[in-house]
Image (tube, grey):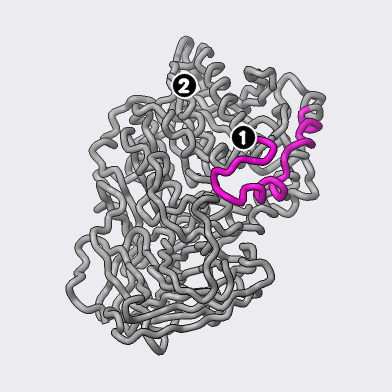
Amino acid sequence: MRDAPVNPDGEAEAWVVTPGDYLATRPGHFRLPARPVSLYVTARDGCRLAVDVWLPTPLPAGARIPTILVSTPYYRRFAMGEGATVDSSPNVAYMRDLFVPRGYALVVADVRGTGASFGRRDSFRSPRERLDSSDIADWIVAQGWSDGRLGATGISYLGAAADFLASTGHAAVKAIAPLFSVWDTYADNYFPGGVALNRLTQKYDLGMIGLDQDNRTVLAQFAAFNHPDYRGPAPVDDDPDGVLLAAAISEHLSNFRQTDFMPEFRFREEGLPYDPDFSSASFSPYSVAGQVRSDVAILSVSGWMDGAGYCNGAISRWLTLNRNPRHLLLGPWDHGARIDISPWRRRQPPSFALWGKVLRFFDEYLMERDTGLRAEAPVHYYVLHEERWHSAHNWPPAETSVVLYPDGDGLLGEGASGAPGEDSHQVDFSIGTGHHTRYERIAGEDVRTYYPDWASRTATHLAYTTPVLHRDLAIAGHAIADLWIASDQPDAALFVYLTEVGADGEEWHVTEGLLRCLHRRESPAPASCRVAWPFRSFRREDAAPMQPGKPERIRVPLLPVGWRFLAGSRIRLSLSGSDADHCVQIPHGRPPRLSLLRGGDRASALYLPVISGNATDRSLT
């Protein structure tokens, strides 16, 4: 593997004060209590919700402090076996250890139908949970230790819960930090490009059976929940014998099943047959974006390998809530920043002080400390293969594009060929991308290396490769595959991949994009879901089958990335019609034959978003 440029820090030029430096200036002056206070808070409909309250120790008499609320379906805390050697709160320990010693109260709630809370779940991210969070906020501000100021944060589901809390308009909410979380559950999570992720649906369903029903045999399949010291959800303090806990778990047996629920949403924003007012919008934060007060500060965080489209969600949130104090952070991370995804990483765990960024944000907007954060650029993003952070005042940061064109003999060139041609690809529904991809971590699988066998995975793709690059090319944002495609079937799925081929032949997966051809029609993005890439509504009225054999122009946005292609490498664009390891067949049992047109007046092209400062007036090859 060829070395990337040496850059041991990669941060200093992008910040006035780096997150790591800020964290070093904010040591904790309080202790954690040995255990939280745990009790039931009663929601407006009488449902009892289990919450843990972590307060700084010792808290002076009469002191009032800000609170951060975390709402989770993954257990606020485990009951533990005697002599346990692991933390009982793996889902929130990093937040507890960050905030509480530094003067914040942390309240962690099991959402209804999960953990020790009563009730049942009628939906993924049920709208009922949104109202529950407002009720818990009412309870918090009524406590003697509360100063009446409230924030919310969390990763994934927990981050979306922070969005939903802000949308209640509760007066106490001052700042939220949704981390690695969706904005549009349909497009960012379960149907990227309109293509259903069937394996994710199956794995999530299995995980929720294990958690909601306290089925430890099932949980043994999940690395995050299978430690032998874990003994199910912790009961509240007034339930030492677990009688109330058992009653709550019995109610969970009626929870919805993800494998039955998610396939109901064939089209975005289409109501259920039994509830016409309930659609995919009902469990997507964008649907209530207009109810977020403009004074609520927003920190939106994601990573380049963050699931099916969570990075799109972070960007769309930032673009949509443009009246708010807002910050956007996009790094070299997978879902939840468990791993630094860079092939050139110095170590597997991220070295970037992400929690320094989160702490500084809440210190500024919730604790009302003067941290200097407002003097920083609002956008920070990482460029892989350069291994350096960049700052910007807007997204996308790229101001121009380099355009490359598929040509004969599998070439990808800088000029469109005058002679028209086409290449065909017979889709094979047995072809997949393996089990070390962006999709595993969102399904609860403990992946630590990404696309290690990428060269063999792309060998069957229809591919176009540039000659050797004579200079570096740095990109940031969404590459767009602007394709002319024909199919011998009325529907197909397009899987488009971008690869860097090193001078020694090693191949690195850069990014990818999915699109179901049924949803090829573009439409203006609504004000609640602003984007910086070609938008599809995925609604029934915009869906249409293709006419077999008729070429159509289809623009496929690839997921955003910051990447530097080095001189001596080559850039490859490749196309497939299947990912058997993650996605449904389209159309079922009818593998299409795809044709890509090139040259002439129907020339397919690849648009790469070039970072300002990169020369675009000189040849790449």
Q: Which residue is mark 1?
A: 126
Magenta-drawn segment: 248-275
Question: Residue at (63%, 20%) from the top-left corner?
Answer: 43
Callout in the foreground (2, 1) = 1
Assess whether residue 274 is covered by the magenta stretch.
yes
Q: CA distance from mark 2 to mark 1?
A: 18 Å
Look at the image and tell me whether residue 34 can be seen: yes
Find residue 29 and report its horizontal and vertical position in percent: 43, 28
Residue at position x 70%, y 24% from top? 236
Residue 190 among magenta residues: no
- Residue 551 lies, in percent from the top left, at 45, 74
Residue 370 placed where, x, y %? Answer: 28, 29
Please indicate, yes or no, whether residue 234 appears anywhere in the rendered image: no
Label 1 crowd bin: few (<14), some (14–19), many (20+), radius 10 Å: some
Q: Quadrant of residue 399?
A: bottom left
Depth check: give the residue in front, 7 or 504: 504
Q: Earlier in the sequence, mark 2 or mark 1?
A: 1
**551 to the left or right of 583:** left
Residue that extends furthest to the bottom in the rendered view of this protein: 409
Helix, strand or loop for disc 1:
loop
Q: Which residue is mark 2?
A: 170
**Quadrant where the N terminus is found in the figure:** bottom left
Q: Residue at x 59, y 68 (%)?
A: 579
Q: Which quadrant: the C terminus?
A: bottom left
| Amino acid at circle 1 | Ser
